[in-house]
Image (cartoon, grey):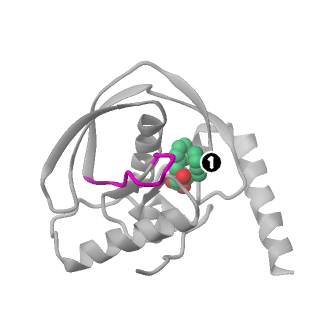
Amino acid sequence: MSLLPILEYPDPRLRTKAQPVTVFDAALQTLIDDMFATMYAAPGIGLAASQVNVHRQLLVLDVSEEKNAPMVLVNPAIVASAGSRTYQEGCLSVPGIFADVDRADRITVEALDRHGQAQSFEADGLLAICIQHEMDHLVGKLFVDYLSPLKRELVRKKLEKQRRAAAG
Ligand code: K2U
Ligand code: ZN
């Protein structure tokens, strides 16, 4: 398994709309395994293929405490949602930035699994938030897009300063 480089805001490739997965071959299985390795190493609880510059509708997540409940969502769709919940979100593509985002509290999801088999389930709490956050990535949306233009500009400048400091 390999660790994949994660694109960082404001990289324009993060704005690419992902295409549906149609081929469930060995290359897809390798990508999924590499995405899990990348997510756990980050560490994170979710990762969208868009974040590793693969523009396919594919998410991996694991919101369990023990890191032993991996989930793969291919071509996911939210078919029902209810309620509202504010959660302070972060993002592996926007390192060091956290902000409150309002999202649906309960969702019903339809997707394919890693072998192309249909799955449908209800999610709430952190799993629901994580799925909505990752599905935003698949349409080129980032959690900073929910901020005011002024706050988003402050985020961009903070990240630019962090990168200059890291470059030395
Ligand atoms: O898309 C990503 O960058 C993965 C996020 C997923 C996420 C963001 C906000 C809320 C829930 C999930 C990363 O896992 S951010 C790191 C993290 C870790 C633990 C709990 C929440 C966020
Ligand atoms: Zn993210």
Name which residue lies at 12% across and 54% down.
117
Q: Is residue 140 above or below residue 110?
A: below
Residue 131, how many percent across, how many down?
40, 43
Q: State the extent of the magenta-drawn residues as a range.
A: 63-74
Q: Is residue 81 above or below residue 47?
A: above
Residue at the farthest front position: 66
Whether residue 96 sits left or right of residue 130 in the image: it is right
Ligand 1 has an atom within 8 Å of the beta carbon of the residue at disc 1: yes
Q: Is residue 71 above or below residue 82?
A: below
Q: Secondary structure at mark 1?
A: loop
Circle 1 residues within 10 Å: few <14, some 14–19, many ≥20: some
Residue 55, how many percent across, how many down?
36, 66
Judging depth in this view, the residue of 161 and 80 nearest the camera is 80
* Magenta residue check for 145: no
Residue 50, quarter of the rendered image:
bottom left
Q: Amino acid at mark 1?
A: Gly
Residue 158, how many percent across, how many down?
80, 57
Name which residue lies at 48% across and 21% down.
84
Name which residue lies at 49% across and 51% down.
66
**Residue tagged by mark 1?**
90
Residue at the farthest left position: 117
Whether residue 119 sits left or right of residue 124 in the image: it is left
Main SS of the magenta segment? loop
